[in-house]
Image (cartoon, rainbow, N blue to C red):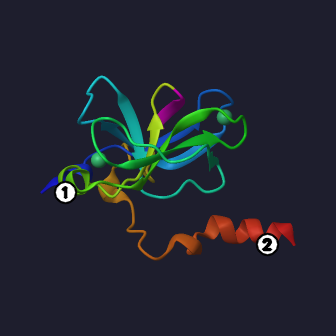
């Protein structure tokens, strides 16, 4: 049931608020179950060459998830965290398959539009990405230019 509700959520483009570089194009607005005051944006794909890990793993007091902060690759500011190893309660309760989180204070987001440019792009409209991460035409053409 919970997965279908995710499909009605808007897809957001996530930019670093400090240097305005694009961090990810598949952001989903999420609210932490533990602390509803904190607004987050999550994504299902590892951000491609836009962020890097800082320091080591840590856990919060609310659960046993192993987290690691991520920083914008361009300006070095911390923009969120990656769930390295989710704890069991989290896996069972709030798992939307998103293990990359952006802190809403560190990013600016824009809702994406669908192909017509008239409607908001929803998660249900996105193609399934399983096993096709490396086949994006963008990265292919990028490689061509480098030659
Ligand atoms: Zn930045
Ligand atoms: Zn957890």
Q: Where is residue 70 in the image (x, y as percent from the top left)?
A: 56, 43
| Sequence-first disc among 2 and 1 | 1
The quarter holding residue 60 reads: top left
The residue at the far left in this view is 1
The quarter holding residue 137 reads: bottom right
Q: Position of residue 65 (x, y in %)?
A: 34, 49
Residue 93 inside the magenta-drawn segment: no
Q: Using the image, determine if residue 35 lies above or below residue 56.
A: above
Nearest to the eye among marks 2 and 1: give it. 1
The residue depicted at 66 percent of the width and 54 percent of the height is 49
Residue beneath label 2, please? 144
Q: Distance between the residues labelled 2 and 1?
A: 42 Å
The residue depicted at 43 percent of the width and 69 percent of the height is 129
The residue depicted at 41 percent of the width and 39 percent of the height is 41
Between 116 and 34, the one lying in front of the other is: 34
Q: Position of residue 131 (x, y in %)?
A: 46, 77
Q: How crowded is mark 1: few (under 14 residues within 10 Å), some or many (20 or more)?
A: few
Residue range highlighted in magenta: 106-110
The answer to whether residue 39 is left or right of residue 22 is: left
Between 16 and 84, the one lying in front of the other is: 84
User: Is label 2 in a helix, a strand or a loop?
Assistant: helix
Could you tell me if residue 112 is visible in this image?
A: no
The residue depicted at 49 percent of the width and 25 percent of the height is 105
Residue 107 inside the magenta-drawn segment: yes
Q: Which mark is residue 140?
A: none
Quadrant including the N terminus: bottom left
The answer to whether residue 103 is left or right of residue 34 is: right
Q: Where is residue 107 in the image (x, y as percent from the top left)?
A: 53, 31
Between 7 and 57, the one lying in front of the other is: 57
Ligand 1, image quadrant it occupies: top right
SS assignment for the magenta stretch, majority: strand
Residue beneath label 1, please? 92
């Amino acid at each position: 049931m919970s997965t279908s509700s995710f499909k009605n959520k808007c897809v957001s483009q996530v930019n670093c608020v400090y240097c305005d570089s694009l961090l990810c194009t598949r952001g989903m607005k999420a609210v932490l179950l533990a602390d509803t005051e904190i607004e987050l944006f999550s994504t299902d794909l590892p951000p491609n060459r836009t962020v890097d890990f800082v320091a080591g793993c840590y856990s919060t007091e609310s659960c046993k998830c192993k987290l690691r902060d991520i920083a914008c690759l361009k300006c070095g500011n911390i923009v969120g965290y990656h769930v390295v190893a989710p704890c069991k309660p989290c896996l069972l309760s709030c798992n939307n398959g998103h293990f990359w989180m952006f802190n809403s204070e560190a990013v600016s987001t824009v809702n994406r539009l669908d192909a017509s440019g008239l409607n908001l792009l929803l998660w249900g409209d996105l193609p399934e990405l399983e096993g096709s991460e490396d086949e994006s035409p963008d990265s292919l053409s990028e490689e061509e230019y480098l030659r």
